[in-house]
Amino acid sequence: MTEKTAKKGAKRRSSAAQSAEARIARAERVSRALSVLYPEPKCELDYSTPFQLLIAVILSAQTTDKRVNTITPTLFERYPDAQALSKANLFALREILRPIGFFRAKARAIRETAKLLVKRHKGEVPRTLAEMVKLQGVARKTANVVLGEAFGISEGIAVDTHVERVARRLGLTEARTVRGVEKDLMALTPREAWAKDHLRMVLFGRYLCVARSPKCDRCPVRSDCFAPESREG
């Protein structure tokens, strides 16, 4: 290896290290700012038990938490636990879910999930990611939300559209996949902060860093944002 080649390699490694260090510092600033903005973040889905949370999160796909909350009182009054939901009439279930969209697929999914919970877990929600993702309609995002919110267990970071958008705009990831975004965020954040940081990013993305016309004038991390909108005005 020539001296010139060695110097180029060292320069690339130094640049990469500085980039990694800058990203970590940025993540810490973002975490502090969002902690001030949302000191005690709460999941906006209404539920009383881990089972009800799991069902609500499954139903929230392709719709809003607010809309799910309009139908879960009726749903959980009629089917409060896995045993009851596992025996639900599919047509009756569809009618309850109709207002939230994709109601046929969601009715099948939550009834099958309830059946699996009864068959494999005595009607209780499992407390590991590996077991959670074996349930109908449950992927990593849903599993991570339920584990963190219901049990305080952090096996990963739930990445939804809000979290992904915020992470990209703030330069916390360049990953091209949801799993890649999750890995980047996990590397930047202490495990004990994963659950609350996820909720803070969701709330931030839902109400301030929205997809269209983000409210940059009210953003506490505007100086760290890479989105073109943050430079306007």
Image: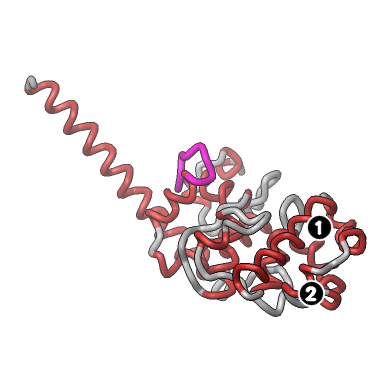
- Left or right of 19 in this view: 143: right
Within-10-Å neighbours for mark 2: few <14, some 14–19, many 20+: some
Rendered residue at 81%/58% (across/down)? 107
- Choose the circle earlier in sequence order: 2 or 1: 2
The residue that mark 2 highlights is 84
In front: 55, or 196? Answer: 55
Task: Give the dominant element type of the magenta stretch: helix, strand or loop.
Answer: loop
Quarter holding the C terminus is top right
The residue that mark 1 highlights is 107
State the image coordinates of residue 132 (x, y, percent, origin top left).
57, 62
Circles 2 and 1, Cβ within 8 Å, touching? The answer is: no
Rendered residue at 50%/66% (across/down)? 128
Amino acid type, residue under disc 1 in the picture: Ala
Amino acid type, residue under disc 2 in the picture: Ala
Q: Nearer the viewer, mark 2 or mark 1?
A: 2
Does 102 appear in magenta? no
Does 173 appear in magenta? yes
